[in-house]
Image: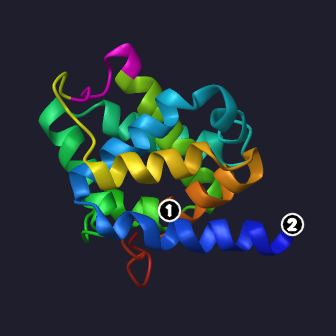
């Protein structure tokens, strides 16, 4: 079972690279909304969920267009303060952050997906693959996917 989890983790680190930044965000949204009942219990229970909620609150305070840009910056490893803050989080805290974003999208505090958004075929295939995994593989896959996002922390006392 360990090799399967490690395999799912490594697959997660590589899988999103084939999608555009917006489609990576779309896939994460579909994962959290379509599979939320099985995936989300691991995220809010993470030891860093208070930290994730603090970062989420920074994003929530921004106007909708800026909220989207922050998500794009994180997914593309842009060197911005919030992306660096995200980059310094543990994998579990990163999962919790995306969970909070998905909840915010559902309740309207975070910019929602466009109503006409369609996940491309490669994203649909990846989503189907994730849905076919057992719970631990899903979490490991997502942990790997969100781990590689965000910029590295700046040297010194800056984030």
- At horizontal 44% and vertical 76% (from top left) the residue drawn is 157
Q: Is residue 88 magenta?
A: no
Q: Which residue is mark 2?
A: 1
- At horizontal 49% and vertical 39% (from top left) the residue drawn is 31
| C-alpha span from label 2 to label 1 | 20 Å
Residue 41, percent from left and from top:
71, 33
- Note whether 74 is above or below 71 in the view shown: below
Q: Mark 1: few, some, or many residues within 10 Å (few <14, many ≥20)?
A: many
Q: Mark 2: few, some, or many residues within 10 Å (few <14, many ≥20)?
A: few
- At horizontal 25% and vertical 29% (from top left) the residue drawn is 113
- At horizontal 74% and vertical 45% (from top left) the residue drawn is 135
Q: Secondary structure at mark 2?
A: loop
Q: Is residue 112 magenta?
A: yes
Q: Which residue is mark 1?
A: 145
Decide which of 153, 76 is in the foreground and name it: 76
Residue 115, percent from left and from top:
19, 21
The residue range painted magenta reads 106-113
Q: Secondary structure at mark 1?
A: helix
């Amino acid at each position: 079972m360990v090799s399967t989890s490690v395999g799912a983790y490594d697959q997660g680190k590589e899988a999103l690279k084939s999608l555009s930044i917006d489609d990576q965000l779309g896939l994460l949204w579909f994962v959290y909304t379509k599979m939320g009942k099985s995936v989300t219990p691991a995220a809010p229970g993470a030891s860093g969920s208070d930290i994730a909620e603090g970062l989420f609150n920074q994003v929530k305070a921004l106007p909708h267009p800026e909220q989207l840009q922050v998500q794009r910056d994180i997914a593309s490893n842009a060197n911005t303060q919030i992306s660096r803050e995200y980059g310094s989080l543990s994998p579990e805290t990163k999962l919790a952050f995306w969970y909070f974003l998905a909840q915010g999208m559902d309740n309207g505090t975070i910019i929602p997906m466009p109503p006409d958004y369609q996940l491309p075929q490669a994203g649909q295939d990846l989503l189907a693959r994730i849905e076919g995994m057992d719970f631990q593989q899903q979490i490991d896959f997502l942990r790997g996917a969100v781990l590689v996002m965000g910029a590295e922390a700046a040297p010194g006392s800056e984030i």
